[in-house]
Image (cartoon, rainbow, N blue to C red):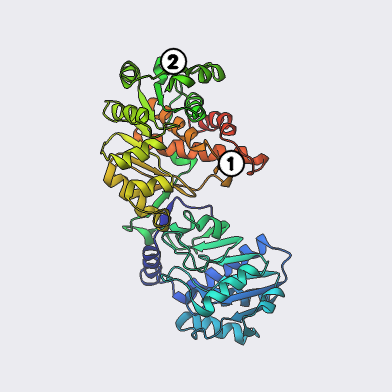
Amino acid sequence: MESLPEMLYRAANTREADRRAIERLKVGGGELMERAGAAAFRLAREHFPRAHRWAVVCGPGNNGGDGYVLARLARAAGLEAETPIVAQAPTPKGDAAAARERWLAAGGSERQLSAAALANADLIIDGMFGTGLERPLQGAWLDAVRAINAGGRPVVALDLPSGLHADTGRVLGAAVRAAVTVTFIGLKAGLFTGEGRTRAGVIRFDDLSVAPSVFEGLRPAARRLTIDNLRGLLAPRMRHAHKGDAGRVLIVGGQPGMPGAARLAGEAAYRAGAGLVTVATHPVHAEVIGSTCPELITAGMNNPGELEPLLERASVVALGPGLGQSAWAQELFDMVVHCQRPLVVDADALNLLARYPKTRPDWILTPHPGEAARLLGSTVPDIQADRFAAVHAIRARYGGVCVLKGSGTLVAGEGELPVWLCDRGNPGLASGGTGDVLTGVIAALRAQDLAPTDAARLGVWAHAAAGDVAARAGERGLMASDLLAPIRAILQQVV
C-alpha cells in the first residue's frame, strides 16, 4: 500500500489508464483483477484482523471480479467467506466470470443476499459497483445498499462505495457507508468531496504496480493540497523586518449585532502573519472590538466616505464578515468593490455580489454552498451535486479565484487546471465564525505578497489543518476561536 497521490481523476480517465495498462504495458485484465483482490484482502486484514466471517457482495462487473478474488484469498487463509448474491443480478462476464469460476472451484459458496447473511458476518466487502455507475440505484441493488448500511458491520469498499458517483461525490439514490475504501491505480475525485468523504471512510490506495505513465496526457480533475506542495510559499522573516513589511489588512464588516465576525477575521489575520489589521465596522461596535482584541485598530463607519483613507493604506481588503445587507452595508460594499486593492469577499458581501454582479481579476471569493447557489442563481442541491462544475462556473462568471467551502473545499484560480482540493478538516468546523477565520487568514497571506491562488490554497489548508488540531479535544463543541492558536503554529511548517 502506498500513501495517497496528489492527483485526482475522473472515472473516464481512470478507465483509460486501465486500458493503457492492459494494451501498452501488457498487463492482462485478469492479472489486474488478481492484484486488486489481493491488495484489498491485505488491507482488510490490516484494518480488521479479528474479523473471521466475511460476506463479499459482488456485482456483475470488474468490481465484483475483484471481490471474487478477495473471497478466494480469504477462504485460502482459513477465514469463513461467502458471496451473497443480489436478487436477479446479471451473470458476470469476461474476467469477472473467470474470477467467479475460480472462487467456486476453490470451494466457495453463494447464496441469496439477505439480512441474515449479513448479520452473521464480522466484515462486509462491497464489490457491487465501481466507477461505471451513472444512474440512481433501483430495485434489488437499492435494497442491497440499504441492507448493508443497516447491517451494523464494518464495510470495506472496493475502489468506490457502491452508489457514490465517482466524479462528483454525489449519492445516486443510496450509497454504501464504508469504514475503509481501497481504491486502485488512480484516485477518484468523488471520494474526496461532496458526500464522498463521509461514504468512503478511510481511503487507502494501491497502484497495482502499474506505472504512472498510464496517466500521461490525461487531465486530472483536481490536485490534493499537501504540505509538500505548499512548503516554501511563505518566506522566512528578515531580521530587520517591521510591521509594514508584513502587510496591512483592512476588514470591512460588523453590522449592528454582528461584531464577532469582524473581530474573528481580524485576529485570524494577525495569527496568519499580517503586520497591521484594521477593522472598519459600525460605530456601535468599534470600541468593543478594540477592547476585546487590543491589537486591532478599529474605525467606526458612519458613512462610506470615512472608508476612503483606510482603503488607501490597505494592502488587502477583506469584505463581508458580519456585513449584513442593509443600506449601510450596500454603501460600504459599493465603495470597496470599486477600490483598487486586492479583495477577499465573503459572507453577506457575496450575497450582495449576487444581487449586483461584477467581475474582477484580482479578488478571492469564498462562498459556502448556499452563497454559491445565490451567485449562480441555482440551489444548494445543484451545487453539491457537482462541486467541481460549480467552482469553475463561479470563477468563470465573476473572475479571480473561487474557494468553494465545504467537505473537500475546492480552490479554482485563474488558468488553474486542475483545481486544488483540501482533504483536511472535520465536521467540528461546522460552527459559526469559522468562515470568518478563513477570510482573515487568506487576507493576511495575500497581504504578505502571495499570489491570489497561492494565498487561497495555503489559507484553506492551514485553516482545515488547524481544525484538525482543535478537534483533538472533540469535534462537538469546537469554536471558531479554537482555530486561532493552531493556525499560527501550522503556518510555520510551510516556511
**Residue 328 placement (x, y as % from top left):** 36, 27
- Residue denoted by label 1: 468
| Residue in the image at 45% along x and 83% along y | 94
Could you say whether the residue bearing mark 1 is in a helix, strand or loop? helix
273 vs 120, left or right, is left
- Residue denoted by label 2: 243
Q: Is residue 10 above or below residue 66?
A: above
**Residue 59 placement (x, y as % from top left):** 52, 77
**Residue 151 placement (x, y as % from top left):** 66, 70
Q: Residues within 10 Å of mark 1 (few under 14, many from 20)?
A: many
Q: Residues within 10 Å of mark 2 (few under 14, many from 20)?
A: few
Q: Is residue 33 above or below residue 410?
A: below
13 vs 67, left or right, is left
For badge 1, the amino acid type reads Asp
Could you say whether the residue bearing mark 2 is in a helix, strand or loop? helix
489 vs 253, left or right, is right
How many angstroms separate mark 2 from mark 1 (CA)? 30 Å
Does any portion of residue 277 appear in the rendered image? Answer: no
Q: Earlier in the sequence, mark 2 or mark 1?
A: 2
